[in-house]
Image: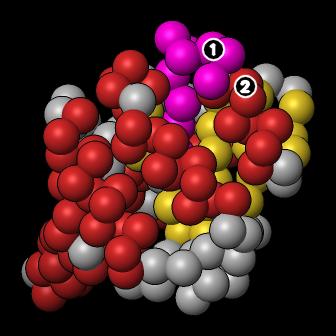
Amino acid sequence: MNHSTSIAEKKDFLKWFLKNHRFHKRECVWLLNYFISDNHVMENLHFVEHAEYCPKAIILSTVCSNEVPFRFLKENIVTSDVEKSFHDIRLNPDEKVYIQLNFKYAYQHTQYRLILDDNPYLPESLQPNKQFAFWTDFIVDEAIISFKQQQLLKRIDEALDTNDKETFLALTKELKKF
């Protein structure tokens, strides 16, 4: 992800998508065909995950998805009217539109993964790199703590074996800090 998808790639994907998927609302087909026919609009079209965070977004679902069939979001306006979204996009062709497609096995489709862009409006807590970094740091910290505890326990055992009361007390005090 996080790449620039060409207009041709987007068009090819949408043509493939229209051939292979059906929508709850037939107007969705008309809307996607409009996108294919207008290069300027297509240039400002971006396929993303979690489009609900974008300032102007369309969420489309196929009949094989349990998600909402259609949503158009623009600032504080939310509508399920495909025609209203069409008119807004047609009247504002310079505005970026972020599209989320919900269909069965979406992430197994190579064509879909190729045209998918990073969502620039995704909250930091939902960004995959941030999530992975958080969990990586957490796991590493836990491993370090566990290793230090094991080393302390080993040294405590050695102090007990040698009847070194002073070292034993110092190490148990250190262990209690964990």
Instruction: Confirm or deny contact between disc 1 and disc 2 (CB under 8 A).
Output: yes
Left or right of 9? Residue 165 is: right
- Which residue is at the front of the view, 152 or 62? 62
- Point out residue 57 in the picture as x, y percentages from the top left corner: 63, 38
| Residue 123 appears anywhere in the view | no
Q: Residue at x 18, y 69 (%)?
A: 110
- The quadrant in which the C terminus is found is bottom left
Where residue 119 sits, quadrant-wise, is top left
**Mark 1, residues whose alpha carbon is within 10 Å: few (<14), some, or many (≥20)?**
few
Does 159 sit above or below residue 172? below
Disc sitting over residue 88 in the figure = 2
Q: Which residue is mark 1?
A: 92
Q: CA distance from mark 1 to mark 2?
A: 6 Å
58 up-or-down from 172: above or below: above
Q: Residue at x 84, y 49 (%)?
A: 81
Residue range highlighted in magenta: 90-100
Q: Which amino acid type is shown beneath numbered disc 2?
A: Asp
Taking the image as shown, residue 8 lies to the left or right of residue 41, namely left
Image quarter of residue 171: bottom left
* Residue at point 18%, 40% (across, down): 8
State the residue in front, 30 or 141: 30
Left or right: 28 in relation to 79: left
- Numbered disc 2: secondary structure: helix
Tell me residue 67's x, y (percent): 69, 74
Q: Nearer the viewer, residue 21 or 122?
A: 21
Where is 86 relative to 95, above or below? below
Q: Is residue 7 left or right of residue 84?
A: left
**Residue 77: % across, % down:** 88, 32
Query: Which amino acid does the dot numbered 1 rest on?
Result: Asn
Residue 25 visible in the shown view: yes
Residue 21 included in the magenta stretch of the image? no
Magenta residue check for 92: yes
